[in-house]
Each structure stands twice: as structure tokens, then as C-alpha cells.
Image (tube, rainbow, N blue to C red):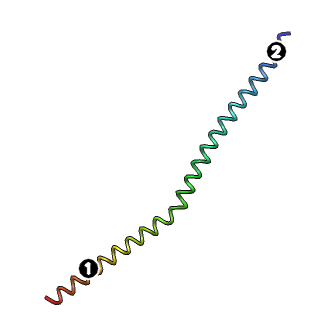
Amino acid sequence: MMRAPKAWMDERYAASQELAEARQEIEALRATVAALQQEVKRLAAAPQEPCALATRTAEALDSVLQNEVLLWQAVDRA
């Protein structure tokens, strides 16, 4: 008579344990998906960074060259 309730409890505990493990796995997968989504956002924004850096570098170099021209013009006048 005690075997039936014990077997039922064992089956129920095993199911509960499986549910707990499944919940943990789902939480781990959620964290992984969230991390991957952030990585995708970061990589999607990445091509803009080199372009902006190249533009700033070109503008700075243009300014340096303009200053060099002004310097040589001043030297030629002297």
C-alpha cells in the first residue's frame, strides 16, 4: 500500500526536477539570446565608426595641409 504513493511521489519529483532543469536551461538560453542581440547591435553600428573616424582624419589632414600652404606662402613673402 505504501509503494503506490511512494512511486507516485518519485514520479512527481522527477517531473518537478525536469521542470526545474528546463527552467534553468531556458534562463540560460534567454541570457545567451540577449547577449547575441547586443552583439548584433554593436556589430551593426561598427561600420559607421570607421567611416566617421576616416572623415575626421581627412578633415584634420586637410586642415594641416591648409596650414602648411599658409606657412609656405608666408615664407615666400619674407
At 78% from the left and 19% from the top, the residue drawn is 9
Q: Is residue 52 above or below residue 28?
A: below
Task: Work out how far the residue at label 1 is from the one at label 2, CA to CA, in angstroms.
Answer: 92 Å
Q: Is residue 8 above or below residue 66?
A: above
> Which mark, by number, is residue 14?
none
Quarter of the image for the C terminus: give it: bottom left
Q: Is residue 24 above or below residue 59?
A: above
Residue bearing mark 2: 5
Q: Secondary structure at mark 2?
A: helix
The x, y position of residue 21, in whole percent, is 68, 32
At 41% from the left and 67% from the top, the residue drawn is 53
* The residue positioned farthest toward the right in the image shown: 1
Q: Is residue 12 above or below residue 21?
A: above
Disc 1 vs disc 2: Cβ atoms closer than 8 Å? no
The x, y position of residue 52, in whole percent, is 44, 68
Residue 20, picture quadrant: top right
Q: How dense is the environment of label 1, judged by Cα within 10 Å: few (below 14), some, or many (20 and up)?
A: few
The x, y position of residue 57, in whole percent, is 37, 71
Q: Nearer the viewer, residue 2 or 34?
A: 34
Kind of residue indicated by mark 1? Asn
Residue bearing mark 1: 67
At 49% from the left and 66% from the top, the residue drawn is 48
* The residue positioned farthest toward the bottom in the image shown: 77
**Horizontally, is 11 left or right of 59 in the view?**
right
Kind of residue indicated by mark 2? Pro
Q: Secondary structure at mark 1?
A: helix
The x, y position of residue 51, in whole percent, is 46, 69
Mark found first going from the N terminus, 1 or 2? 2
Q: How dense is the environment of label 2, judged by Cα within 10 Å: few (below 14), some, or many (20 and up)?
A: few
Residue 28, picture quadrant: top right
At 16% from the left and 90% from the top, the residue drawn is 77
